[in-house]
Image (spheres, rainbow, N blue to C red):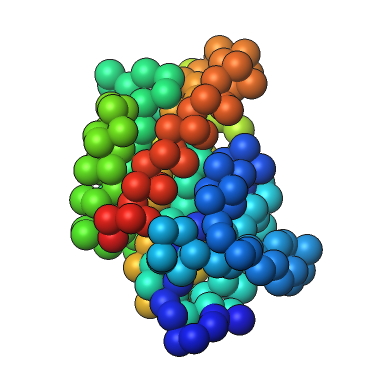
Amino acid sequence: MTKNNEKAIGIIAAMQIEIDGIKAQISDPETVTVSGIDFVSGHINGRYVVCAKCGVGKVFAALCAQTMCLGFDLECIINTGVAGGLADGLSVLDVVVADSVVQHDMDTSPLGDPVGLLSGINIVNIPVATRIARVLSECVEQVGVKCVLGTVATGDQFVATDEKRRYIKETFNAAACEMEGGAIGQVCYVNGVPFGIIRAISDGGDGEAVLDYPTFAAKAAENSVRAVLRFIDKF
C-alpha cells in the first residue's frame, strides 16, 4: 500500500472524534479497507501519513497496528486520543505523553510472574522511542497545553472507580489509563517500529468519570490532534 517508496507516519485513534481532525488535513486521500478498518493515506504539509480509526479496545487496536505495519513502510506509529488521568496534578484537558506503556489487565502472577508481564517478550513496561516522546512533549507545550511524561496503562475496561484507579496508579506508577496504547505498543515492539502515545485527559478515572467523559472527550481529543499535527511537521 505504500507508494513511491515513501516512509509513512502512522496515526491510530480509537474513535472518530480522535482522528477526524487529522484526516481532514490529508491532501488527495486514498482509502484502503482491511478487516473493516479504513486506512486513509496521503500527505500533510508534504509528509506522507496514513491514519486509521481502530475501534475501542486492545484487540481492535492490535489488529489495526499489525495491518498498518504490514501494509505500509512506516517511520513510526503515533497513537492519539483521550484517557483517564492518574498522575497527581493532572487536570481535564491536560496531556500525557507516554515514556512507556503497560497492560494493567495482563496478570499471570499466580504462576509467579510480575503483574503486567507480557508473555513471549517478558517485559512489563514497553519503552517508547525517546526521540518521539521528546518531540511529542515539545509539540504539546508549543500548542499551549500542560504536558506530563509518564507511563500509560492499558486495559479492556473503562476505569471509573476510585479503587481501580488507585490500583493502576500504585501498581504501575501510571500517569493515565486507557484501552489501546499498550496493545499498539506491543505490536510495534515485536515489529521493530518506533511508536509514541499521546493522551489528552478527558476524566479522572474515578467515580465521576462517567459524567466527565462525555462532557470533555471531544475537547480533549482536539488537544491531542493539535499536537499530533505539529509533530507531523517537526519529526
Q: Nearer the viewer, residue 80 or 172?
A: 80
Residue 142, position in %: x, y?
25, 36
Please determine whether, in this image, residue 165 is positioned above or below residue 46. Answer: above
Q: In this rendering, does residue 160 appear at all?
A: no
Looking at the image, residue 114 sits to the left or right of residue 208; the answer is left
Q: Quadrant of the N terminus?
A: bottom right
Rendered residue at 54%/81% (across/down): 2
Please determine whether, in this image, residue 66 is positioned above or below residue 96. Answer: below
Q: Nearer the viewer, residue 222 or 54?
A: 222
Q: Residue lying furthest right in this view? A: 36
Q: Quadrant of residue 149?
A: top left
Residue 191, position in %: x, y?
44, 77
Q: Nearer the viewer, residue 39 or 23?
A: 23
Residue 107, position in %: x, y?
50, 52
Rendered residue at 52%/25% (across/down): 219
Q: In this rendering, does residue 162 appear at all?
A: yes
Rendered residue at 49%/28% (across/down): 220
Q: Nearer the viewer, residue 78 or 114?
A: 78
Residue 110, position in %: x, y?
49, 53
Q: Quadrant of the C terminus?
A: bottom left
Rendered residue at 51%/34% (across/down): 221
